[in-house]
Image: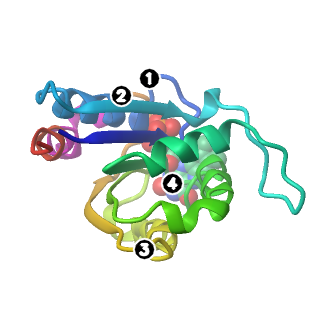
């Protein structure tokens, strides 16, 4: 039994990240004991990291991460980097770094470009996990060469995500 928190940082409803996250849920749900929490950042109300911080939805999400076994980070590639929503969310986890320890991570990326050009974005996501104690990146899924909503349905990454998630027992 695992608690799995899926963070989707694309603003597009029915977009490629959205579909990959749903597919991850489908796979993880094959084990009925798994608990799955889906957080769509576009629906969350949270501020940038600031010196004087008001409490908001990012603090609630941090509690979910601290309480999880598995964390899925899904981002579209924007200008060779993660989306601004994901970056801001990661920045907001700063006060909780030491408490988000020992987690397994999965990175799900979508981009119009090919796989080799996505490495820069993958590296930036590692910038987060490398900062957390005992984190383990289990898999990186490259949804390359997808630009229109639904393109990912015809990409091998779509099946790959189902298989990865279905192995979570
Ligand atoms: C603001 C913005 C910047 C983008 N920058 C890139 C980029 O640098 N490289 C790329 O391959 N695709 C880029 N794209 C295309 C998206 O990564 C691509 O369409 C992806 O499939 C979107 O994922 P989504 O459907 O989950 O939103 C960009 C799209 C937007 C809206």
Spatial CA span between label 1 and label 3: 34 Å
Give the foreground label among 3 and 4: 3
Q: Earlier in the sequence, mark 2 or mark 3?
A: 3
Image x and y of residue 125, in percent: 47, 65
Q: Which residue has dot 4 on it?
A: 77
Specify whether residue 155 is in view: yes
Q: In front here: 64 or 140?
A: 64
Q: Respond yes or no on whether mark 4 lies under 8 Å from ligand 1.
A: yes
**Is 15 situated left or right of 103 in this image?**
right
- Residue 14's disc is 1
Q: Which residue has dot 3 on it?
A: 133
Residue 92: image quadrant is bottom right
Q: Earlier in the sequence, mark 1 or mark 3?
A: 1
Label 2 secondary element: loop
**Magenta stretch containing residue 158, yes or no?**
yes
- Residue 150's disc is 2
User: Up-down: is 104 above or below 14?
Assistant: below
Label 4 secondary element: loop
**Is 21 situated left or right of 91 in this image?**
left
**Magenta stretch containing residue 88, yes or no?**
no
């Amino acid at each position: 039994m695992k608690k799995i928190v899926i963070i989707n940082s694309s603003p597009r409803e029915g977009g490629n990240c959205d579909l990959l996250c749903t597919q991850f849920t489908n796979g993880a749900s094959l084990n009925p004991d798994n608990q799955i929490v889906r957080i769509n950042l576009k629906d969350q109300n949270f501020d940038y990291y600031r010196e004087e911080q008001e409490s908001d939805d990012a603090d609630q999400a941090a509690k979910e991460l601290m309480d999880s076994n598995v964390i899925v980070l899904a981002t579209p590639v924007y200008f060779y980097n993660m989306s601004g929503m994901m970056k801001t969310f990661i920045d907001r986890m700063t006060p909780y770094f030491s408490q988000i320890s020992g987690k397994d991570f999965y990175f799900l990326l979508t981009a119009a470009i090919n796989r080799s050009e996505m490495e820069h974005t993958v590296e930036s996501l590692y910038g987060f996990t490398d900062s957390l104690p005992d984190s383990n990146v289990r898999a990186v899924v490259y949804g390359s060469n997808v630009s229109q909503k639904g393109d990912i349905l015809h990409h091998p990454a779509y099946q790959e995500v189902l298989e990865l998630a279905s192995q979570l027992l």
